[in-house]
Image (cartoon, rainbow, N blue to C red):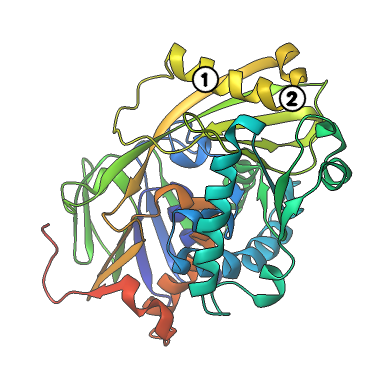
């Protein structure tokens, strides 16, 4: 007989985990307070950035390793899903205006320092050796003709990229419908979970028992995991027919560093760095002005762009900004993916599956796993 598992939280992590376990023969029940379209999820408000090296400036090497090992998993998953899902790994371009050259140099020094301390299994040497630290204006223009004459130097990091998060969520929704029809996954949408315990989930409909329960609620798990906090992120989606960018562009700036992630057909996601706040109110006028002004400073074509929507949400983080898997018999809690959700989720899911199937965990990831004998209360 197949083993039963109840997954609480149908964000990116919960969905990927449900799909992976159902594919391994588990009988999966998934619970979420929202519906299948998840408009309030962090995954819906994300940018789908896959930047293991760029994130090293402020992240631990373990994040880069999780990111690199997630890239081939993303490729396989996207191939298996009913798409199409926009996905590319054409690298990342980091630029700064002349007055902010010091910020670009600081980014370079921090990144080089982190790379020197990384072992080859965190960042493949073949990739690190291809980083172009001092792009000339002509090299930059060759990489991104749309930025020709706008910047005189930059940094190019290969192998990085992005995926279209909303098309991914749509494809996952189709996959769940098919799995539900095949009786592999049972989806309990619009179901508020009142209590998560070893082997059982309590909702307003009553108590359900499983061989395993996995808590993927993110900020919703705060009552059971006191050190989880929210970190606000903000994005604006625009249609800019006068702008052509082939890869994500990061702008170094002392006040509002941002990224611009291109989608298909001149659609772009413009986002800011993290804000230490659990406020989920709509984007403020000040934030919108700063984001859009910075985007205009990258390319004047954004002045004529149409604003499609703006979103703000909070990502769950732990004090060390690393994910953690807390494990006790019959109960697993996964949290703390921070702003690296899309970057590292596939490999975190793989670690969770290995734990559930009693498979060995690589030594480098043992620090992310906390084994508990008693229920977790804080």
**Residue 76: numbered disc:** none
Q: Nearer the viewer, residue 35 or 51?
A: 51
User: Residue 75 vs residue 173: left or right?
Assistant: right
Quarter holding the N terminus? bottom left
Residue at 85% of width from left, 33% of height from top? 148
Residue at 10% of width from left, 58% of height from top? 377
SS at badge 1: helix
Residue named by callout 1: 290
User: Residue 32 vs residue 154: left or right?
Assistant: left
Residue 256 lies, in percent from the top left, at 50, 29
Circle 2 Cα neighbour tier, 10 Å, few/some/many (<14 / 14–19 / ≥20): some
Is 363 located above or below residue 338 in the figure? below
Is 239 located above or below residue 136 in the figure? above
- Total numbered circles: 2
Residue 242 lies, in percent from the top left, at 83, 20
| Quarter-of-image position of residue 250 | top right
User: Residue 116 vs residue 325: left or right?
Assistant: right
Separation of disc 2 and disc 1 at Cα?
14 Å
Residue 35 lies, in percent from the top left, at 44, 35
The answer to whether one can see residue 363 in this image is yes
Quarter holding the C terminus? bottom left
Earlier-in-chain disc, 2 versus 1: 1
Residue named by callout 2: 299
| Quarter-of-image position of residue 94 | top right
| Quarter-of-image position of residue 252 | top right
Q: Nearer the viewer, residue 355 or 153?
A: 153
Residue 9 lies, in percent from the top left, at 36, 48
Is 52 located above or below residue 291 in the figure? below
Is 165 located above or below residue 282 in the figure? below
Circle 1 Cα neighbour tier, 10 Å, few/some/many (<14 / 14–19 / ≥20): some
């Amino acid at each position: 007989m197949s083993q039963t598992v109840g997954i609480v939280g149908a964000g990116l992590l919960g969905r990927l985990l449900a799909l992976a376990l159902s594919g391994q023969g588990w009988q999966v029940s998934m619970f979420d307070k929202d519906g299948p379209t998840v408009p309030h999820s962090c995954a819906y408000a994300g940018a789908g950035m896959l930047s293991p090296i760029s994130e090293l400036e402020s992240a631990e090497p373990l994040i880069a390793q999780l990111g690199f090992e997630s890239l081939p998993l993303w490729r396989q998953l996207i191939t298996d899903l009913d798409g199409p899902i926009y996905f590319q790994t054409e690298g990342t371009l980091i630029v700064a205006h002349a007055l902010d050259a010091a910020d670009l140099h600081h980014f370079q020094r921090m990144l080089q320092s982190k790379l020197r301390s990384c072992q080859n299994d965190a960042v493949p040497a073949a990739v690190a050796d291809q980083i172009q630290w001092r792009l000339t204006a002509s090299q930059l223009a060759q990489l991104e003709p749309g930025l020709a004459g706008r910047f005189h130097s930059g940094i190019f990091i290969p192998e990085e990229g992005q995926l279209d998060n909303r098309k991914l969520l749509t494809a996952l929704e189709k996959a769940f419908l098919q799995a539900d029809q095949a009786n592999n996954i049972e989806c309990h949408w619009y179901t508020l979970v009142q209590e998560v315990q070893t082997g059982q989930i309590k909702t307003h409909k009553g108590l359900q028992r499983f061989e395993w329960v996995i808590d993927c609620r993110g900020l919703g798990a705060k009552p059971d995991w006191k050190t989880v906090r929210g970190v606000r992120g903000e994005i604006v989606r625009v249609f800019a027919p006068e702008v052509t960018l082939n890869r994500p562009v990061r702008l170094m700036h002392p006040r509002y560093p941002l990224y611009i992630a291109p989608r298909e057909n001149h659609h772009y996601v413009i986002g800011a760095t993290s804000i230490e706040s659990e406020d989920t109110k709509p984007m403020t006028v000040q934030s919108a002005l700063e984001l859009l002004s910075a985007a205009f400073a990258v390319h004047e074509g954004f002045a004529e762009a149409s604003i499609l929507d703006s979103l703000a949400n909070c990502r769950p983080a732990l004090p060390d900004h690393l994910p953690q898997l807390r494990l006790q018999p019959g109960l697993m809690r996964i949290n703390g993916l921070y702003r690296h959700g899309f970057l590292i989720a596939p490999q975190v899911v793989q670690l969770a599956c290995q734990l559930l199937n009693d498979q060995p965990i690589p030594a480098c990831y043992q620090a992310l796993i906390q084994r508990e004998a008693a229920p977790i209360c804080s």
